[in-house]
Image (cartoon, grey):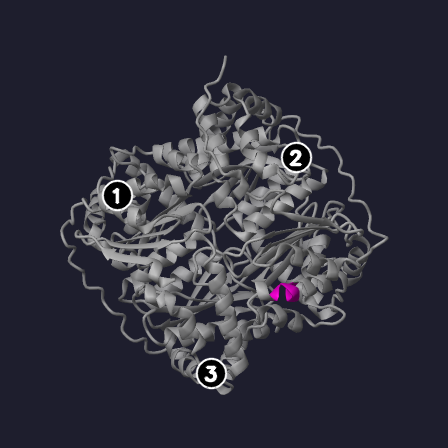
Amino acid sequence: MSDRIVRTRLRNGLEVRLKEIHSAPLISAWIWYRVGSRNERPGTTGISHLVEHMQFKGTPRFPAGLLDKAISRDGGYWNAMTWLDWTAYFETMPAGSIDLGLRLEADRMVHSLFDADEFESERTVVIAERQGNENEPTFRLAEEVQATAFRVHPYHHEVIGHMADLETVTRDDLVAHYRRYYVPGNAVLAIAGDFRSGPMLERVRQLFGTLPAGRPSETPVIPAEPEQRGEKTVVIEGPGDTPYLDIAYHVPAARSDDFFPLSVLDSALAGASSLNLFGGGISNKTSRLYRALVGGEVAAAIGGGLAATIDPYLYSIQATVRPDRTPEQALKVYDEEIARLLDHPVSGDEVAKAIKQARALFAYGSESITNQAFWLGYSEIFADYAWFETYLDRIAAITPEQVHAVATKYLAPSNRVVGIYRPTGERAHG
Amino acid sequence: MAERRPRLPVLDVRSLPGPQTIERRQLSNGLVILARENFSSPSVVLTGSLAVGSLGETRHNAGLADLTASALMRGTSGRSFESIYETIEAIGASLSIGAGTHATSFRGKSLAEDLVVLLDLLNDVLRQPSFPPVQVDRLRAEKLTGLSIRDQDTASVAQLAFDELLYGDHPYALPSDGYRESVTGLTDAAVHAFHRRAYGPAGMLLAIVGAVPAARALDAAETVLGDWRNPEQPAPPAMPAVRGLAGSARRDTALSGKSQCDLVVGSVGPSRFDPDYLAAALGNNILGRFGMMGRLGDVVREQAGLAYSVASSITGGPGPGPWQVMAGVAPANVERSLDLIREEIRRFVRDGVTPQELADNQANFIGRLPLQMESNEGVAGALVNMERFDLGLDYYQRYPERVAGITREHVRAAASRFLEPELMAMTVAGPGAGGS
C-alpha cells in the first residue's frame, strides 16, 4: 500500500503527500498548517481559529460567498478546523471537480483579504460560537481542567480562546499571524482518492510550486510544562442538576513509545476510542470504568480520551454523574477502580480484546476517502505517516506488563487534575 | 417564460445502487431484506427498522417505546447484559437500537467475518429480551439523567416547546424520549407488554452492505429471522390529521446561567410520501443549507454576524414533520434574528427562487450522490429509504432526472403550500427568555 504513496517536498518548502485510491470517484484534498492554539500567546488566544474563519471571507480571485456555492454546486463537501497543534482545510469532491479545491487552497494561502468589516462581523460570529460552547457544562469544566493542568505551556487555553481576547484582538494581529504561519514551508498538502499521481503532482507543482516561500518563520520557543507536583482539584458551579467529573492525567506526546500501551490501557479502562476525526467508535460497556461507575449506579455514562499531540498533553476520563449521586461518591468509586487496576494488572485477554478493537476501528476509519486523506496529513503534523502505517503492528505487540507499567507511571494522583462540575439546581421555566 | 436549461453534473448512474446490484428478498413473515456488496474494505454494516414507535403514546406514558428499545440489549433469555456487550465489544463491533415516532431503528457494524455474530445477537435481542429488573431500573435512571441534561440544553428546550406549540394535541407534540415524570412511571410490566404486543417482523426492514456476498448475506439473515412470527402484532396506529396554527404563536423559556439563546421558527412540512416533497426539499436547501447555510446563512451569519449556526431543515418522514429554522444567538440579538429569519421566509414564499439558485441546488442534489454513497452506512441508509418510502430500487438511478425536472414553479408552490409566514410557531430558550 505504501508504495502507492508519493512523498515530496516542493522547492518552496511545501510537503506533499499523494495516495491513489480508486474505490469511489472521489478525491479529498487537505492542507495542514502547523499552527494552532499551541502557537498562541496571552492577549491573542483564539487567533488561529479566527484566522481559519477569515479564510472563508474571500480573496480577490474568489470573493466571499462565491466559493461555498461553487463547491456545493459540484456536490462537494468542505470544511476547516483548528486544534491544539494545527489548522486544516479540506475539500472532498467528485474526482473531476477537485481542481477547484486545489486552486482555492493555493490562492488563500497567500491572498486572503481580511476585509475590516468582514472581520468585525466574524468576530461576533466566533463570540456566538464560544457562547454556544459555554452553554455546555462539559465545555466549561474541560476548559477549567485544561487551564489547571497547564500553567506554562500554551495548551493552557481552549482553542476557541478567551472571551476577553476575542473581544480585543485586532485585524492587524490576524494578518500578522496569517503571514507568519500560512507559508508553504509550514504546511502539508495531502490528497487521496481517484487520481493518477503523476498528473496530480504536476498540477500541484503548477498551483503551489510558484507560491513565494515567505519569510522562514522563526520558531517561537514553546515553554515546556514543568512536572506537576501533587494533585490539583478544580470545582465549578453552574445550572442544572447533573454533576460531572473530568479527571485528566499528564501523558506524553504521540511520538513517545508509551503512547501505544496508553492506548491499550484506555481501551481496557474506558473503552476503545477511535483516533479518527470522523466516524463512530464502539460501545464501552465492558470497560472497567463503565462496570464500576455505571454498573455501580453512580454515573449514567463514562468516556475516556487520548489525543495524538506534538507536546505532552492529557489523558482524560469524563463521567456524567447521576443527579441522585454526588461527584464525591463517583470519585470514590473511580479511585477504588484505579487502585484495583494497579493491584490487578490488565489480563492477556483484555489486551487481546483491545488489539482486535483497534484493528476493527482502524478498518472502519480507513473506509472513507476523506479519512484516508486526513491521516495522510494529520500523522505528518505530530509524527510522520509511518506512525499511522505501523500503528496496528505496534498496538499488536503490546504486552500486559507494558500496560501495567504505564498505568503505574501515569495514573498517580500527583499527576492528575480532578475537575468537578457542581450543579446549582436551577431549572428551566417558561 | 421558458427557463434556461442549466448544466448539471452527469453521473455514471450504474455506479449508484440499483436493481442490478441490490439483492432483495421478502420473507413470508413480512420481513424485507436488502443487500449490496462492497469489497473495498473488510467491514459490513447492517441497518434497518421495525414498524413500532412512540406514535400511540400519551403525555403519561411518553418514552415507553424508547425505554423498551434501549432495554432490548440489557439481557435476553440466554444472555446477560455483560455477555451481550462482551460478544460485540470483544470483536470491535457495534450494535445499537433506538425508537423514534414511527419506527424502531437499529444499526450495527463489524468486520465482515463477524456478520453472523451480529445477526445472531440482533435476532436474540429483538425476539427474546428478558428485561432484567435491575438492568431496567439502571437504564431508567440513565434515561432520567439524560432527560435532566436535555431539559437544560437550550436547543432541546426550544425544540420541545416548538413541537408542543405547533402540533398541539397531535402525537408529534410529544418527545419520543418522554418526560421525567412519564419515564419515572414506566413499569417493567409496561415494557414487557409493549414488546410482546408491538414487536414483530411485519413491516421490518433489514439492509446489509459490505464485504459479504449479497446472496450469502440474505441467506444468513433469513436463517435467523425467517421463523419469527407475532400473530398479535398490530397495524401501525392511524395518525390523526394535523390541525395547524390559527395564527403565529410564540413561547419563550428561561434558562438561567447560559450564555446563548436557541430559537426555532417554522410550520408543518410535507411527509416523504407527498408529491411536493422533493421540490420542498430543494427549496429548503436554498433557504437554509446550500453553501454556508443557504440564504439564511448569508443574511443572519455572513451579513449580520448574529449567529455561528443558523439552518433550516425539513423532516421528510412518514408523516407531516416540521419545516423549520434553528439558530443559536446572543440573548441581545434574539428579536433581530427572529425578524431577519421571518423576513427571509416571507421573501422566499413571495418571490420564489432564482434560476441560478435552482440550477445550483439541482447540481448539488445530483453531484453529492457519490459522496453520500461512498460509505456502507450511506448505501445501507439509501436501501432502507427506497424500501420504506416505496421509491423503487431504481430510485437513485432515476434521481438525477427527477431532480433536473423540478422547476421554479414547483419550488414556489411547495413553499407557499407549507410555509405560511403569518402562521408560524416560534420558540426561544435561554438566558432572559420569557422572564420568570
* Residue pointed to by mark 3: A400
Left or right, B221 with reference to A393 = right
Same chain? Circles 3 and 1: yes
Badge 3 marks a residue whose secondary structure is helix
* Residue pointed to by mark 2: B271
Q: Marks 3 and 2: CB-CB under 8 Å?
A: no
Which amino acid lies under the numbered mark 3 shown in the image of this protein? Answer: Pro
Q: Position of residue A175 (x, y in %)?
A: 21, 44
The chain letter for the residue carrying disc 1 is: A
| Residue farthest to the top, as pictured | B1
Q: Position of residue A310 (x, y in %)?
A: 30, 65
Q: CA distance from mark 2 to mark 1?
A: 44 Å
| Residue farthest to the bottom, as pictured | A343
Which amino acid lies under the numbered mark 1 shown in the image of this protein? Answer: Ala
Q: Residues within 10 Å of mark 3 (few under 14, many from 20)?
A: some
User: Which residue is at 26% across, 33% downward?
Assistant: A61
Disc on res. A152: none
The chain letter for the residue carrying disc 2 is: B
Q: CA distance from mark 3 to mark 1?
A: 48 Å
Label 3 vs 1, first from the N-terminus = 1
Same chain? Circles 2 and 1: no
Query: Which residues are drawn in magenta?
Result: B114-118
Q: Residues within 10 Å of mark 1 (few under 14, many from 20)?
A: some
* Residue pointed to by mark 1: A106
In this view, A98 is above or below B211: above
Front-lying residue, B364 or B187: B364
Front-lying residue, A356 or A307: A356
Front-lying residue, A242 or A393: A393
Q: Position of residue B286 (x, y in %)?
A: 48, 30
Q: CA distance from mark 3 to mark 2?
A: 55 Å
Labels 2, 1: front one: 1
